[in-house]
Amino acid sequence: MRAYQIILTFTALLLVTGVPLASAQKDSNVTVVLVGGPEVGKRAPDFSLPWASREGVGPIESPYQLASDRGRTVVIAFYPRDFTKGCTAQLQTFGEQYDSLFGPDVTLVGISTDSVSTHSRFAASLGLPFRLLSDPDQRISKQYSSKDAGGYNRRTVYVVGPDGRVKYRNMKFNALDPRAYSELRTAVKSVSGT
Amino acid sequence: MTRCLGVTLMFAGTIAGAAPLLGQESSMAVGSKAPVVAVRDLDGRSVDLGQYIGKKPVFLEFWATWCELCEELLPRIRAARTAYGKEVEFFGINVTVNQTPARVRRYLEQHKPGFRTLYDDEGTSTRAYQVPATSYVVIVDRKGNIAYTGSGGTQEFDPVLRRITSK
């Protein structure tokens, strides 16, 4: 048997062995989500990222550090992009319903790949009462398993307790589902005790 | 051996064509059965979409007052309803995120979209239809199969509506 025939046969066999998986996926509408990231009960990886708010860009020498909020409940919301025309109102809802969803004793941060200057304009346009963090190389979103295949973040939400451990997470936050917000509200209140 | 290899490669090629399905995001595929769910209207009354799906063509738009693309799409929806409203049931399902009924009513009075408004405050249809974003439109044929899905402010509905109706 010639070398190229061996290579072709081997390649064909590799493809053939993928048949059951392909068949299973062909008839299903199940999203294949690689669920990594810190699980509930595990320590949330610390990180430090530049930030912006509706007031402007934060000082470069004072990035946001998750560890600085130890002792408080922190909600980390990964999202795709600022100023999307896809019409999902996740951040706007977080902003307008901040008191009922989170309350004054909870820190909320949003994380995307956008620059701090874009964050500043976006936060100002919506009047967001929380900071937006810039993770352009997705170093942090990768740690939290919140990268998508297209170079943006998936919509995920983590609730980190005062002890620094993950108390709740939603790895596919549906920004259009009222139940996603009510579940998040319940999770935050159970952690923060409000 | 060569013939055997050829057959194997042809078979493998067929399977490889299916490989892109691996890891695909969930979505309502054209040709699949439209979910039949009950959703409340603005008065709190339950509306069973099963009264329409599988019995006549149905047009669904998932929208919100804050959705700029939805507003951009309104003229096309009004035109579609004018042309096909006698044969197709038009529903606008408000996703209710950051939406009060009062806010929705004010918007309807101002913009008059023409569709029958549902207010899905439990997210039942949003989850059932795996709605990716507002301005998402699903058109269902009279057999209850999804004939079209799309998002954005410049969608064209006439070709599919013409196909699934008597026109």
Image: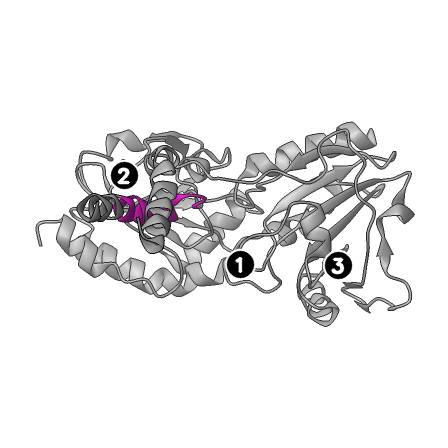
Q: Which quadrant: the N terminus of chain B?
A: top left
Chain of the residue under label 3? A
Question: How far apart are the alpha carbons under marks 2 and 3?
Answer: 40 Å
Question: How far apart are the alpha carbons under marks 2 and 1?
Answer: 26 Å
Instruction: Specify start and end residues of the magenta stretch as a single range.
Output: B12-24
The residue drawn where x is 66% and y is 50% is A78
Q: Pointer 3: residues within 10 angstroms few (<14), some, or many (20+)?
A: many
Q: Are marks 2 and 1 on the same chain?
A: no
- Amino acid type at circle 1 is Gly
Residues under numbered marks 2 and 1 in contact, where contact means CB atoms less than 8 Å apart: no
The residue tagged with tag 2: helix, strand or loop? loop
Query: Which numbered disc covers residue A133?
Result: 3
Inspect the magenta stretch and tell me whether residue A134 lies in it: no
Q: Position of residue B33 (x, y in %)?
A: 27, 35
Question: How far apart are the alpha carbons under marks 1 and 3?
Answer: 19 Å
Q: Is residue B109 above or below residue A24?
A: below
Near-viewer residue (B88 or B2): B2
The residue under label 2 is B32
Near-viewer residue (B64 or A52): A52
B62 with respect to B52 (left or right): right
Mark nearest the camera among 1 and 3 is: 1
Q: Quadrant of residue B91?
A: top left
Q: Is residue B97 visible?
A: yes
Chain of the residue under label 2? B
- Amino acid type at circle 2 is Ser
Query: Which numbered disc covers residue A150?
Result: 1
Q: Pointer 1: residues within 10 angstroms few (<14), some, or many (20+)?
A: few
Q: Is residue B89 visible?
A: no
Q: Position of residue A29 (x, y in %)?
A: 39, 37
Q: Are marks 2 and 3 on the same chain?
A: no
